[in-house]
Amino acid sequence: MEQATVTPLKKTPLNARHRALGAKMVSFGGWDMPVEYSGIVNEHLAVRTRAGLFDVSHMGEIEIAGKDALAAVQRISSNDASKLAVGQAQYSGLLTPQGTFIDDLLVYRLAPAHFLLVVNASHIPKDYAWIAEQIKPAGDAVAVDASARYTLLALQGPQARETLQSLTGVDLADIRYYWFAHGEVAGVRATISRTGYTGEDGFEMFVPPQSAERVWQAVLEAGRTAGVIPCGLGARDTLRLEAAMRLHGNDIDETTTALEADLSWIVGWKKDDFNGAAALREQKAAGVKRKLVGFEMIDRGIARQGYEVYVGERTVPGCRVTSGTQTPYLKKAIGMAYLPAEHSIPETEFDVDIRGRRIRARVVPMPFYKRAK
Amino acid sequence: MSYPGGYKYTKDHEWIELVDGRGKVGITDYAQQQLGDVVYIELPEVGATLKQGQSFGTIESVKAVSELYAPVGGEVVEVNAALKDKPEAVNADPHGSWMIVVKLANAAEAGALLDATQYQELLK
């Protein structure tokens, strides 16, 4: 008999629900997750035109609290958390001293000295260990891996607000983009945040795991006539790509800096000190050598992650496609790639090596898709 | 979806319908289910010569790229160009969406292919 040496995949509280819905399941970041229910294209279009419900409970939650919590967050998070009011959230990076990404995250200010960080599933232990170590000098602040205490659901799309409003007493119109409120959804205690990873209006809901199924069912039921459907990680990926949101492990990682990734806006340049500050200030002064750009294919072909790019007659070290697909809504082959900074201006043409053939592509402004306000 | 009894099948999940020394080739329902939404198909030119088991093109879903393998060797005598603009037809009607027609170089090669019953056994 062969010994099983693989760690069993973790399951969210909605695992049985996904299987009952006939979802195709995949291993993702150590979790058994639904990649699609009715098809990626169908789910993608539902989110762009109606709304879709996602189980994103694999995401990690790390809380930082204590008298010096703000100082602790300021050390480890690239964005300026002092700008956050209680009830507000921001996108940020967890950076190495070189200014590269250990992870990207959302920082929520729950109370003046209490923060919630939402991090990527596969990095929870690494992020937690790093954070716990890095905040030691900050004084009175502790970090807690609270991932097991939250189930995270995302309802995204033009019908999200109306659907969710029928289940909560919280006035959703009062929650501005990247703000959150506490209340109840379908009688379940929830933190409702106007955030998402799709480029649509929508909400993310932190609910207790034991009540997750109730909320999931209630949202699908409330949205049935509006055409709200369950959506998997496949559509989440194509939606975020159309919206040009970075994916850690593809577009950003420990080899790419916040400046190279064109994420200068999540760097708190006015802060005293934080991980990566010196390196980023130096890079900013000198100018980046490569930059993450959006592109679309001119000739027929789909560029995928890892494909090499040719600028003129040569490939350039560190320059490659980081994400790419044929997008369901725009119906174009698009992607992101690192290109030499001098070739990163929109309309610049270059080649992608698609399995041995050089196919023409063009730099375009990001995001590829922007919803009508 | 049922697997037509008149077709032959490969372990790589292609089907071939043989008529008078020529074979229409496509991918099976199982293959399209595994792929998910098909968004792109790259096929050879008419006149290309294929060996049995050789890649004759690629099929891409939103998420992944897969090779297409020739069930038999021979010359490509027809290509279903309509699939270029309508690749989703492979999802809707996998056993009707042929990709190429091959004029067999060696009829004996077809003998080793699976019949519908054997193919469905393989899927179990």
Image (cartoon, grey):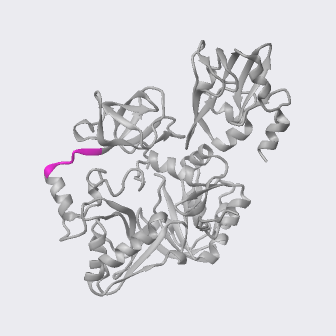
Q: Is residue A339 rendered to the left or right of residue A295?
A: left
Question: In this view of the protein, can residue A371 be seen by the observer?
Answer: no
Queried whether the magenta region covers residue A221, the answer comes back as no
Q: Nearer the viewer, residue B71 or A118?
A: B71
Q: Is residue A63 rendered to the left or right of residue A36?
A: left
Q: Quadrant of residue A18?
A: bottom right
Q: Residue at x 58, y 45 (%)?
A: A45
Q: Nearer the viewer, residue A45 or A136?
A: A136
Q: Residue at x 56, y 49 (%)?
A: A235
Looking at the picture, how far across and down is residue A302, in whole percent? 48, 34
Looking at the picture, how far across and down is residue A229, in whole percent? 64, 54
The mark total stands at 0
- Residue sticking out furthest to the front: A1
Question: In this view of the protein, can residue A360 be seen by the observer?
Answer: yes
Q: Quadrant of residue A113?
A: bottom left
Queried whether the magenta region covers residue A288, the answer comes back as yes
Which stretch is magenta?
A286-291
Looking at the picture, how far across and down is residue A321, in whole percent? 39, 41
- Residue sticking out furthest to the left: A285
Looking at the picture, how far across and down is residue A263, in whole percent? 30, 54
Q: Quadrant of residue A306?
A: top left
Q: Residue at x 62, y 28 (%)?
A: B86
B71 vs A126: above or below: above
A229 vs B27: above or below: below
Name the image quarter holding the N terminus of chain A.
bottom right
Q: Residue at x 29, y 27 (%)?
A: A313
